[in-house]
């Protein structure tokens, strides 16, 4: 039962985290399909050349996405006849970073490492994509441009219909396969398996991370948080790069799509090339990028979410179902609920279309131009569809930047939230309610990071003083977390809780009364 | 290299292959190994305890040349920890910046040793300046880890 509920929890967590990105991916694919068109899509991304690899990498870096969200986009790129190497370059780079995670990365103790990782990802794309296109030339397809919907409301409706249909197409199956990888890991890796094996001194750490990260699924933000934890705890830098490349960049669904579309031989060559290049870079950067001031904590909790949540024979108080619901309620962020809700609506609409309109009459109607030209006003300019497409893609990027300001609020707001969470964590720990304390400590950790990133976003810099206060609070929270999880005596837990409370007081005073830059 | 570390990736890969084929659980339960935030014995525990810790090791550089390498390594750690120890006090930003700069200068001085007696004297002077800043802290600041 523990295994089954572990799978349920991990798959639901992954689905909720990925929902906003899957929705974005569906939107991008529909815009490319209905507005930009296949010919222009191919021109935008390029195909079968080194410059196309750079173009695809750049577009992937700018557009927000995750490895599940790129699946519909890859399918659309394939329909546009683009060469395999170029599609793979986009598929690998798009899930690595988004504005939220880039900001998070820039406020880590070693932002240079994040920049170096981004540069290394370009090397991976260029080398593996370039070699692949050399080995398999002529993977482009002839482009047949389907009829475009007429300007006006029908054009917009066509995008919505395309999204709905795609949401219940092969994409849904591939996303399901991607999520299955998370479930498989939850079965194979008991709780805490990866806590002690990814140290800087373990030369096999990048190799081990490859084995785990390939089937795993993580959003850019999750991976960036894991990277931050790895830097802070003195874990292997090479393993961190592998995590970024495969944990964020790949999943089983994407691998399945490659297999179904291109066959096992091309898939195997691509995987071998990727793994070889990524591992070579990982071992190459291990020493140069290892932070000189890293504290080797000897373990990390960063990968606990890749492992099963429940130990064999352990039954949470209240039962598994209640615990799963409780964890999901505690961890899921508002934008994830919204993304999941919209995705659900889209899937319902797609299922309805599939059932009630299997012949595609709605799509045919959307393609028909109005019989009567009612004329257009002086200021009612008909924009070419590709212009609208680029505006839509720019809008998605702009929305993700605006989203950063919502996700990382001003310091005073973050401090208010953090204060409430800190009270919950500390009072629960002192009163002996360790389960409640264990729930609230990660909330405190999250707001502590968002406090620093929010300050950085608005002031362009956060002083070493403020970073040190944030780091102290993080350390104290981790110590409290260990005391709670290890079942330390009540007096010991209380001492750690008071230490965390004091660190929060210093943090609050620093952000309220000292200049941030 | 730890043998367990070498074989674990292979075991995980095999387990993944078997698991995907429906062969059930094949990774052994992990060994009981409680993770803790390891704090070395020479960690001062608080900012107030740092100046005497620096003085003691600076003295060892001169008094026990055979022990100089160990003392230097410990000094390097202590100087690196000082900004974080200072963060766990009510020092205002200006004073914290001074402490961080002192620690950085001490680390740089330690990296270019030269004459042990001169090095020890410079580090003792760093400890004195640090102690002077610590003295400005209000009473009740945590002096030592329990």
Image: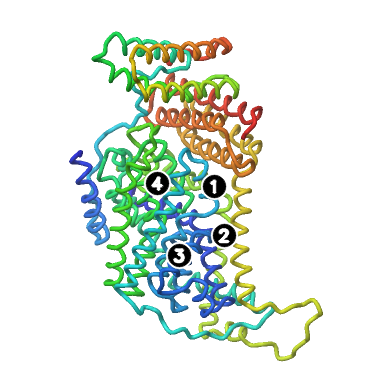
Which of marks 1 and 4 precedes in the sequence? Answer: 1
Which residue in the protein does label 3 denote?
Answer: A54
Which of marks 2 and 3 precedes in the sequence? Answer: 3
Q: What residue is drawn where x is 18% and y is 41%? A: B3
Which residue in the protein does label 1 denote?
Answer: A103
Percent coordinates x, y for residue A244 in the rendering: 40, 52
Which residue in the protein does label 2 denote?
Answer: A341
Q: What residue is drawn where x is 47% and y is 66%? A: A56
Chain letter for mark 1, please: A
Mark 3–mark 4 Cα distance, whole angstroms, equals 33 Å
For the question of whether residue A227 can be seen, the reply is yes
Q: Is residue A491 above or below residue A298?
A: above
Check disc 2 and report its element: helix, strand or loop: helix
Kindly report which numbered mark, 4 or 1, lies closer to the viewer in this rendering. 1
Mark 2–mark 1 Cα distance, whole angstroms, equals 27 Å
Kindly report which numbered mark, 2 or 1, lies closer to the viewer in this rendering. 1
Labels 3 and 1 within one chain? yes
Labelled disc at residue A513: none
Residue A370 is left or right of residue A98, and the answer is right
**CA neighbours of label 2 inside 10 A, class few (<14), some (14 to 19), many (20+):** some
Which of marks 1 and 2 precedes in the sequence? Answer: 1
Q: Is residue A427 above or below residue A411?
A: above
Check disc 3 and report its element: helix, strand or loop: helix
Mark 4–mark 2 Cα distance, whole angstroms, equals 23 Å
Percent coordinates x, y for residue B56 in the rendering: 36, 10
Quick one: A18 or A493, which is closer to the camera?
A18
Chain letter for mark 2, please: A
Could you tell me if the residues under marks 3 and 2 are in contact, i.e. CB atoms within 8 Å? no
Which residue in the protein does label 4 denote?
Answer: A305
């Amino acid at each position: 039962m523990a295994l089954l509920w572990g799978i349920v929890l991990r798959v639901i967590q992954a689905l909720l985290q990925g929902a906003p990105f899957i929705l974005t991916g569906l939107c991008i694919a529909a815009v490319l399909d209905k507005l930009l068109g296949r010919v222009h899509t191919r021109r935008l991304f390029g195909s079968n050349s080194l410059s196309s690899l750079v173009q695809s990498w750049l577009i992937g870096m700018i557009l927000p996405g995750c490895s599940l969200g790129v699946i519909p986009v890859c399918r659309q790129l394939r329909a546009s006849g683009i060469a395999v190497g170029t599609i793979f370059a986009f598929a690998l780079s798009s899930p690595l970073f988004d504005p939220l995670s880039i900001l998070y990365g820039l406020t880590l103790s070693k932002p240079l490492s994040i920049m170096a990782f981004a540069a290394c990802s370009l090397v991976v794309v260029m080398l593996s994509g370039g070699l692949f296109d050399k080995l398999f030339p002529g993977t482009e397809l002839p482009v047949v441009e389907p009829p475009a919907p007429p300007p006006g409301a029908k054009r917009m409706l066509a995008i919505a219909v395309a999204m709905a249909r795609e949401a219940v197409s092969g994409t849904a199956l591939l996303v399901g396969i991607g999520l299955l990888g998370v479930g498989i890991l939850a079965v194979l890796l008991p709780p805490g398996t990866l806590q002690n094996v990814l140290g800087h001194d373990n030369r096999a750490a990048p190799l081990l991370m490859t084995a785990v990260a390939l089937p795993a699924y993580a959003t850019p933000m999750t991976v960036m948080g894991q990277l931050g934890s790895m830097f802070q705890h003195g874990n292997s830098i090479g393993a961190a790069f592998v995590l970024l490349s495969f944990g964020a960049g790949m999943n089983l669904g994407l691998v399945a799509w490659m297999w179904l579309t291109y066959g096992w031989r091309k898939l195997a060559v691509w995987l071998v090339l990727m793994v070889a290049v990524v591992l070579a870079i990982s071992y190459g950067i291990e020493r140069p990028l290892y932070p000189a001031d890293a504290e080797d904590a000897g373990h990390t909790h960063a990968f606990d979410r890749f492992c099963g949540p429940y130990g064999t024979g352990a039954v949470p108080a209240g039962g598994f179902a209640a615990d799963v619901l409780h964890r999901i309620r505690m961890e899921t962020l508002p934008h994830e609920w919204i993304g999941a809700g919209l995705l659900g609506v889209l899937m319902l609409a797609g299922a309805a279309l599939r059932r009630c309109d299997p012949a595609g009459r709605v799509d045919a109607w959307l393609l028909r131009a109005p019989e009567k030209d009612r004329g257009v006003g002086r200021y009612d300019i008909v924009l070419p569809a590709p212009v609208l497409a680029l505006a839509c893609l720019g809008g998605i990027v702009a929305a993700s930047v605006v989203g950063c300001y919502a996700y990382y609020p001003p310091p005073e707001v973050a401090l208010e939230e953090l204060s409430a969470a800190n009270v919950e964590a500390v009072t629960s720990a002192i009163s002996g309610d360790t389960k409640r304390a264990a729930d609230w400590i990660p909330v405190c950790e999250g707001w502590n990071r968002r406090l620093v990133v929010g300050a950085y976003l608005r002031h362009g810099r956060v002083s070493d003083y403020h970073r040190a206060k944030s780091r102290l609070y993080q350390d104290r929270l981790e110590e409290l977390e260990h005391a709670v999880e290890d079942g330390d005596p009540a007096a010991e837990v209380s001492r750690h809780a008071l230490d965390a409370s004091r660190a929060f007081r210093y943090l609050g005073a620093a952000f309220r009364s000292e200049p941030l830059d | 290299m730890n043998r367990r570390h070498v074989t674990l990736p292979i075991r995980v890969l095999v387990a993944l292959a078997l698991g995907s084929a429906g062969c059930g659980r094949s990774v052994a339960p992990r060994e009981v190994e409680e993770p803790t935030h390891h704090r070395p014995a020479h960690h001062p525990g608080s900012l107030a305890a740092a100046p005497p810790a620096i003085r003691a090791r600076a003295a060892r550089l001169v008094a026990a040349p055979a022990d100089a390498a160990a003392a230097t390594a410990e000094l390097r750690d202590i100087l690196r920890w000082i900004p974080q120890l200072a963060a766990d006090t009510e020092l205002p930003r200006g004073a914290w910046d001074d402490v961080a700069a002192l620690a950085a200068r001490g680390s740089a001085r330690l990296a270019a040793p030269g004459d042990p007696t001169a090095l020890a004297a410079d580090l003792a002077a760093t400890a004195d300046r640090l102690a002077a800043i610590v003295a400005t802290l209000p009473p009740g600041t945590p002096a030592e880890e329990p």
